[in-house]
Every structure is written in structure tokens, then in C-alpha cells.
Image (cartoon, rainbow, N blue to C red):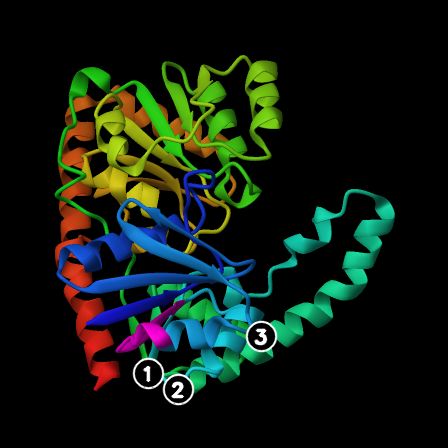
Amino acid sequence: MRLVILSPGYPAENDPYNWAFVHARAKLYRSAGHDVLAVVPGARTRWVFEGVEARQVPLKDLPQEILVWRPDVVAVHGSYRKIIAAARRLQLPRVVWVHGHEALWEWGAFLRGASLRARIALAVKTPFRLLAQQVRVRRFLRSSRFVVFVSAWMRRAAERHTATRYPHAIIIPNPVDTELFRYAWEPTRLRRGITARSLNSRKYGVDLAIRAIARARDADLRVVGTGALEQSLRRLAQSLGARVTFTGRFVPHEDMPRLYAQFGFFVAASRVEAQGVAMCEAMATGLPVVATRVGGIPEFVQDGAGGLLVAPGDWRALGAAIDALLADPGFAAGQSWAARQRVLETCSAAVVIPKELHLLAEAAR
């Protein structure tokens, strides 16, 4: 098949985290023998990232740019205004993926203003923007051939927030390349924790992970990722005397398995999470997870079968769970093996990619 991926963003050398989970499946589609082109709205430019061709095209030219490439089907990720406008102008079959807040009432926009006046302006504008987004998303999803949610929680949340049901919806998690992320856990590294997150949003709860490590008795934490919150998170760690270090740089995806092999557990302290791809990749290498029971996380980590779950936002319980994991190496070893098995069963690329390709081929008929 010839597949076009249409999304609001795509990774590049200077922005490697930008919709990286979409790029991960693009590479797997190519490995399965399909032609893939990634298209993003914006000022015209083109690049190749890890073997995948990407083009950024002005919105008015985007439909023609895609049609000239003669795709069989369009995979739409991120149903925002420009993406919906572009997709509607294409007389092509489409499958739409819903990943998170594009289908939710996302009130965090209130807090993004740099000044009091800016925050007041956002407080006035945001409800109308959110309402318009939900109306657009509902119409768009209902008119698409198939809709894919990455977790059952994501489907329930989207149906609740958009006030409708999607009977043509299918639940397929984001894929994990379990050939790349091989089992590599060693009990001698158990006390070393890691979290891999974008540091551009509080929703990933890195601050909670830092507080949990400060409370834990004998563990340290490596924070992998960069973003606007990095300096404030560093200050928090320093003020608490937490045993936390930061990479301060982007780590290429293919290097993550070797990095995970140096650690003993993964912390996923999210406030909101549709799935947790980095968490699942860490689990594939055998890292037991200490996580908050939010969103789709319990669909991939069962308490006592792959890791330990605590109440949302409870960093004290998170620290206690880390202590419990480290106190019993035999228990931790069992959780490590269960974490790997859980990923193999639920979201390994060997399970997910054939489902996605079958769905895309079905839509293209």
C-alpha cells in the first residue's frame, strides 16, 4: 500500500519528540514493505527523519500535494482544526486515530498565559474554542471509515467529552517494537529508577516522580527528556535533596533500549495518560513500573503483575511503592518478567501493526 500519514507534527532533527509515536508506526509500516509519506500543515519544507520522508505543506496546497503522491489511504493522527479541514478536502478513504486531548475538554489552556491579562483572555476564549473543537471532532470521527482509540479508557473519555458514541471504533494500542526493546533486566540495577518524558507538560507528572524519589529510602532517578519545565524541575529536585539526575538532551529512539538496560524500574507518575508508550517500551525491556492509576495505564500495567499502581497524584504512595519494590528483589524479578509478557500480549508491534495494516487495507477497498 501507499500510505499517507497526516498529523499536526512530525519529528525532525531539531525537534525529535514531535509526534514521535506516529513516526514509530511509520517506520514499522515501511519495515512491512509499504510506502509511507508523512504530511504536516505549515510553511513549505521537506525532510527525511530516520528513513521516513516528511513534507510540511501550506494548508491550501496540502490536498493536491497528497493526491499527486497517489496514496491508497490516509491515516489521520491528531484531529485538530487544520488537520480536519485538510482531510475533508481529500476524496480518499481515511482511518482516524484518537490519541488524547484532541477529543477532550483540555482546561490547562487557562494556565498558559504569560501575564494576568493573557490568562484572563484565555479564560474567556478557551471554552468557546473547546466547544468548537469538540463539535468538529464529533462530526469528523462519525464521518470517517474507521476510528482507532489507543485504549478503552481513551474511547470512553472521548465518547463522554464529545457526547456521542462511535460504533465503528476499534481499540488498538500504540505499537512497541519488542525486537528493538528486548528483555535486559538485571537485579543488580534495581535501585536505579528512570522516567522518559517530554518536559513540556505537567500532565506527565515528573514533579511527582521527583517528590516520590525524595521520599523513597534508597533509590535514585534519571529523568530522560527535555522541555520548557526542565529548569523548574531541576530546582525542585535540588530543593528536596532528591537523588535525581537529568540527561539534559534528546536520546535517539534506537538508543533507548541500551539506556533502559542500565536501570531497574520505571516511574510513570502521569496525571493524564491515554496509554504511556515510553512506559510500555520500558516494560518490554523488563523494567517493572511504579505508576499512578490514571487513564489507560491500568490496561497495560496490572497492580502486582508488571508493576505497582498508586492513586492519582499521590507521590507519597508512589515513594512507598518504590520502597516496596526495592525491598523484595524476588518480587521485583517476578514483576520484571510480567512486564515483558504484558507488553508482548497487549501492544507489541507483532500484534498491533498487522491489525493497523489490515484496517487501512480494509478502508482502502
Q: What stretch is highlighted in magenta?
A: 68-76
Which secondary structure lies at badge 3?
helix
Mark 1 or 2, which is nearer the eye?
Answer: 2
SS for tag 2?
loop
Q: Residue 349 carries which label?
A: none
What type is the residue that disc 3 sits on? Gln
Q: Which amino acid does label 2 sit on?
A: Gln
Residue 307 painted magenta: no
The amino acid beneath tag 1 is Pro
Q: Residue 93 carries which label?
A: 1
Residue occupying the point 16% across, 27% down: 185
- Find residue 154 and report its horizontal and vertical position in percent: 41, 64
Q: Is residue 307 left or right of residue 238?
A: left
Q: What is the C-alpha distance between the residues marked 3 and 1?
A: 22 Å
Category of crowding for the residue at label 3, using alpha-carbon neighbours closer than 10 angstroms: few (below 14), some (14–19), many (at least 20): many
Residue 332 seen in the current view: yes
Q: Does the magenta stretch include residue 69?
A: yes
How crowded pointer 1 is (Cα within 10 Å; few <14, some 14-19, many 20+) is rated as: many
Residue holding disc 2 = 91
Q: Is residue 49 left or right of residue 83?
A: left
Residue 274 horizontal/vertical position (percent): 41, 56
The quadrant in which the C terminus is found is bottom left
Foreground: disc 2 or disc 3: 2
The answer to whether 132 is drawn above or below residue 291 in the figure is below
- Residue 134 badge: 3
**Residue drawn at (49%, 51%) of the image:** 272
